[in-house]
Image: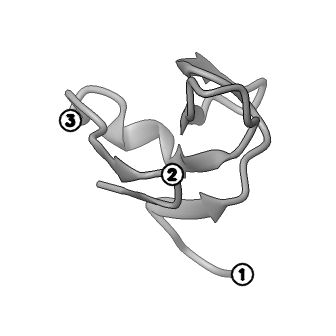
Amino acid sequence: MIKWDIIGLSEVWRKNEEQFELPSGRTFYFKGTGNGKPIGVGFITNKDLKTWITEIEEIVDRIAR
């Protein structure tokens, strides 16, 4: 069994920026471009980190922090 806190995702085919809770209680954050291309990056975070994440900054279409 692998223990993890954050999983980084690339090529998240979604537009804009959003976060929502998955049925497992984990949170899915993503940022995509607003220029008509549905590409971007995202993160799935463990339930315990929900209150610690305040912002996700997109550097370019494929890099965020």
Image: 54 above or below 10: above
Q: Amino acid at mark 1?
A: Met
Q: Secondary structure at mark 3?
A: loop
Q: Residues within 10 Å of mark 3 (few under 14, many from 20)?
A: few
Residue 16 is situated, as x and y percent measured from the top left of the image, at 57, 20
Q: Residue furthest bottom?
A: 1
Image: 54 above or below 6: above
Q: Which residue is mark 2?
A: 61
Q: How far is mark 2 from mark 1, CA to CA?
A: 32 Å
Q: Which residue is mark 3?
A: 52
* Residue 1 circle label: 1
- Residue drawn at the location 23% of the way across and 31% of the way down: 55
* Circle nearer the viewer, 1 or 3: 3
Q: Secondary structure at mark 2?
A: loop
Residue 20 is situated, as x and y percent measured from the top left of the image, at 60, 18
Image: 1 above or below 54: below
